[in-house]
């Protein structure tokens, strides 16, 4: 956690270039963050092209999601980031992405969670060492009132200390890691599994 | 609106590189424009590779779609661009793209419009602030007589001041924005929604 | 037709880089050619990685498909190229590609041709000026005996002077143009239409 | 087989960049190797980003899969590589990839093998000269006990000297070649065929 603000900003900029390039952060959607100190997070500001972020496109917030940089407007979803840093001290980076597959799968799944099983790639998630387990991903209904949405996420986190990510219906994915590269690995793993699951549903029984 | 012709030409060239690279302007299809002055538009000439546009591949027209540069042939669809600049003074750029998804979705939809609802990404369109609304996209039948096609588009524009884009059946998308980057953001948002909608249709009930 | 061998070789190398990059010439499949003189063609040699062609990876043949460069082995399908140069004097380049979509569509279509109609992109083919026409693409069964296959293609060409390309079942596409860029534009247009057609079939009735 | 360790390491690094770029080695999955000498293999170490391998991310093992470089941990699946080098002296490179299509197809196929027929691209596999044959690809159930999994693979190899690759269910592909470029060509050919097969299944009967 000893990286400087400039180093973390660079990680966020590069994460954006990668995630936008993969089509997972289109049309100024998504937001990314890194823990700057025990009580501060570095977040993307609102409404920027995620493949073209600059050093000025991040700002520091406290853990209640308040901007500590006058004149910069944090993303509307800041609270969903800081909530995660407060939940676990070992989380160093949080990525919210917005892919077609996450959107479609979260809308087509009417129940309140998705379960992945028997995929070798489940081992890409922190703490998972075999395909012979289940990864449960909750799906929360979308809400423009972010405090209210965070209030629905918190009980799930409290009860599932092994949670590796969650979906917001019609909106996208939240996942995280000790480092930015851990969080990016988890985004890749989720997108792989979403793609598999959609193809499995399309083909099963054919 | 104080950008020079050279600057706007450069924006059109870069838009073409991006849109061609994404597969949304294949095989010399598509045309792009920017407002040069209250009564002039800068448009792509007819029949060029959209990923390899040069400075000489644009021309100035008046708002009736007439070329103001002797010897250069404007795109057949010029009138569909200038119609939009005349409709709203705040429009600074118009993009017509030609993706597989726009083509397929406009052909498969037999009614005269598509409606998007409950997608967080609807917020990428100008004037939209929540997923709890509907974005209605009209679909016009294709026509090689562009004046006749423009004549069918005009009543829709007159009655829907909040229109953010439209489809021509089997042909592609028209969308726009105050700036080129606004128009590009709307293309990305539309393509995201087209992709979602096609996947939703394929998977619903499976 | 006044381009030198070196210039045409460069066009073939760049076409390969593009077509391989798009996934339309995988695993050393495909072959490309350009007319060098009224009675000579420049063709890719057998079995090379199409995204990494070098100047030495082309050879000159006569119009019967015989190598005019001792020690270099022409592609097994040379005769399918030279047949086209003999068919029409205005053809300057021939591209044979091998995409997933061409393979799947040619296998799923049990009749001996595909017909495209009502697509604006049909206008990307030489001689087509409206979507209100039909583009008919014959499908020939695959055959390792290329002379026999060419013997089945010839009557179709003789009877359809407006032919813009054909498919070999489970194998790929042949298309052509006055110049290399014309042939590339036709490959893009065919791949666009194949993609549309497959999606239309998957979704129709859903 | 006279390439140096540095040259083979470079081939592995470049293979990783290519395979990751294609989406076939996501989220630190996959492992690659090359034969260094009759009794030694050079393999990727465990858990690295496959698009960003460095020279230090490979290690030498003996043919029983034991690390010959103290302090470096070989991939858990090392034995599946060395098993192949022991099986055939002419194998110079082994690639294990982990694509969505390989994962989905191996899960949807309930029988213990896939058969490809009538695809021209079958000719990309070593020893195949016509589409008029069948390529049989066995599918083994996934197992975290790699010695036990290798024990199930061995009898198949012993009985099928023409085997060009195999699948592990929900996990990925193993294929190989005399050189790294031969192995890469076979990965491309398999991925092409997996894609075709999934599309054929989705569309058949529509």
Image: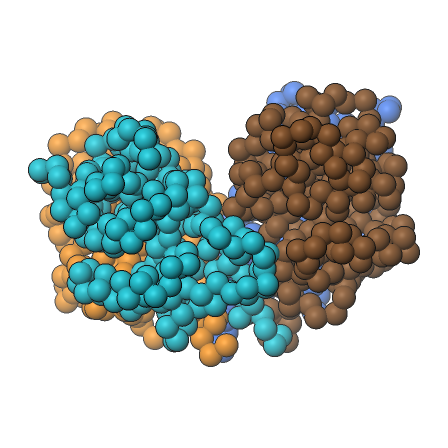
Chain colours: A orange, B blue, C brown, D cyan
Q: Which sits in the foreground, B7 or A18?
A: A18
Establish if A184 lies above or below B39: below
Residue drawn at (42%, 54%) of the image: A99
Q: How many marks?
A: 0
Establish if A116 lies above or below B142: below
Image spot of residue A54 (x, y percent): 37, 29
Left or right: A130, with A30 as reference point: left
Query: Quadrant where the N terminus of chain D lies?
Result: top left
Residue drawn at (72%, 48%) of the image: C174
Which quarter of the figure has residue B96?
top right
Image spot of residue D100 (x, y percent): 40, 58
Residue drawn at (87%, 23%) of the image: B70
Image spot of residue D117 (x, y percent): 55, 65
Query: Quadrant where the C terminus of chain D lies?
Result: bottom right
Residue drawn at (13%, 39%) of the image: D68
Q: Evaluate whether residue D178 shows in this view.
A: yes
Left or right: D43, with C69 as reference point: left
Q: Evaluate whether residue B144 shows in this view.
A: no
Left or right: C194, with C48 as reference point: right
Which quarter of the figure has residue D131?
bottom right
Left or right: C79, with A5 as reference point: right
Establish if A19 lies above or below C205: above
Image spot of residue C165 (x, y percent): 77, 50
């Amino acid at each position: 956690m000893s990286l400087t603000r400039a180093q973390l900003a660079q990680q966020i900029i590069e994460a954006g270039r990668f995630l936008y390039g993969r089509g997972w952060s289109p049309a100024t959607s998504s937001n990314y963050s890194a823990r700057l100190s025990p009580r501060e997070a570095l977040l993307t500001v609102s409404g920027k092209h995620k493949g073209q972020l600059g050093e000025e496109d991040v700002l520091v917030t406290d853990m209640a999601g308040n901007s500590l940089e006058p004149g910069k407007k944090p993303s509307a979803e800041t609270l969903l980031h800081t909530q995660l840093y407060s939940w676990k001290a070992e989380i160093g980076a949080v990525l919210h992405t917005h892919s077609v597959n996450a959107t479609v799968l979260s809308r087509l799944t009417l129940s309140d969670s998705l379960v992945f099983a028997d995929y070798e790639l489940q081992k890409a998630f922190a703490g998972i060492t075999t395909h012979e387990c289940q990864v449960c991903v909750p799906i929360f209904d979308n809400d423009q009132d972010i405090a209210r949405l965070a209030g629905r996420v918190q009980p799930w986190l409290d009860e599932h200390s092994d949670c590796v990510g969650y979906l917001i219906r019609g909106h996208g994915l939240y996942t995280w890691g000790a480092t930015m590269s851990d969080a990016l690995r988890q985004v890749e793993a989720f997108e792989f599994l979403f793609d598999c699951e959609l193809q499995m549903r399309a083909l099963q029984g054919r």
